[in-house]
Image (cartoon, grey):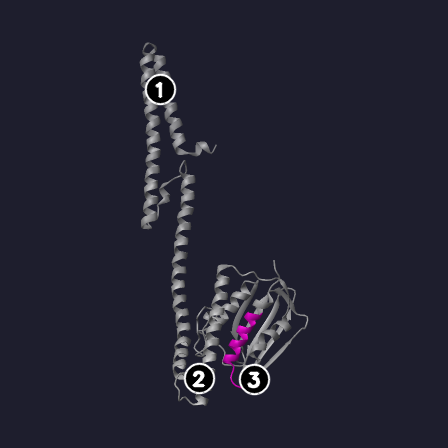
Amino acid sequence: MKFLRNPEVRFSLVWHFFLLLSAVLLGFFFPSQSGILLILFSILYIGSHYWITWRRYRRLEKLAGEIDTMLHSQIPIQFEKYREGELSILENELSKMTLRLSEQAAALEDDKKFLADSMADISHQIRSPLTSSNLILSLLMEPDLPASKRKKLLQELVQLLSRIDWLVESLLKMSKMDAGTVCFQQTSVKAESLIRQAAEPLMIPMELREQNFSLSGDPGTSFTGDPAWCREAILNILKNCMEHTPLGGCITASYSQNAIYTEIIIEDNGPGFDKEDLPHLFERFYKGKNASQQSVGIGLALARMVVSQQNGTLKAENRPEGGARFIIKFYPAR
């Protein structure tokens, strides 16, 4: 019986059985003193009952004090001294509670640090183009500014404003995914059409850089996902490749499908990744050694978030012949 596994119950039963046996034996040998013996053993029984109860509540009071100390001083409770018995279930639950509280406290501390670092990074990333924009605006206010110089400054201002707009929009998208408020569609996505649509905004910048973009693969390749968000991820990867591919370079995208996953590979013939950068490429606000001055460090992080939240994986590596390679795999929904 589980009830008898409690040491306090066993002790109480043995003690009361001893009192009962003693009362019976003394009453048998001293029948004339039965009344006095009855009163004596009744007092002993009541006293032992309240003594055992007092011990139990004293232990509970001590445990409550240790819990209060743990909550206010972060001093762990030594549960080893609470053996199997009446307090075992309480001890087990308290052990789970203290472990969970410790994990939550650590998680909150990490979130607090991450938020502080993120706010500092966001502030820095937005302040830089805003400062440049203010400087350009002050120059544009000069009445004797040549027309050619004014046109060039206006072009730079448009680029800075576009950068701020993209930065804010990307940060909002990442915040939505962090909060779990993004509802991804589950529709059939054609890989060829997806990559072409993602590359379309980059065709003119690639042409100005004299870069060649090629696409190959099985026309029937498809997967289940959200077309708009997947296009966002592919666009960020292609943009990264474009920025790190030299003039006259090549960017290629291929796609294939098997029974396990749909794979999209995007490559360039640029300098590739530094070995020290590879483990951190998809971290927020991380900028590698070869990053451009306009790089913010959230494009690849956003791409991985989009892919991973749609049952996919995104990996980056260096090509043996030189250049960068991004491998995207989308797996069927479970």
Picture disc at residue 22: 1
Closer-to-camera residue (39/72): 72
Disc 1 residue type (three-letter): Ser
Q: Which residue is mark 2?
A: 153
| Mark 3 closeness class: few <14, some 14–19, many ≥20 residues within 10 Å | few
| Mark 1 closeness class: few <14, some 14–19, many ≥20 residues within 10 Å | some
Disc 3 residue type (three-letter): Glu
Picture disc at residue 207: 3
Q: Main secondary structure of the magenta part?
A: helix
- Among the two numbered marks 1 and 2 on one chain, the one whose residue lies closer to the N terminus: 1
Task: Find the distance from the CA under tag 3 to the CA under tag 2.
Answer: 23 Å
| Mark 2 closeness class: few <14, some 14–19, many ≥20 residues within 10 Å | some
Q: Residue at x 54, y 61 (%)?
A: 182
Q: Position of residue 60 (x, y in %)?
A: 35, 37
Q: Which residues are magenta?
A: 231-249
Q: Is the residue under label 2 in contact with that under label 3 (CB below 8 Å)?
A: no
Q: Position of residue 325 (x, y in %)?
A: 54, 75
| Residue occupying the far front of the picture | 143
Disc 2 residue type (three-letter): Leu
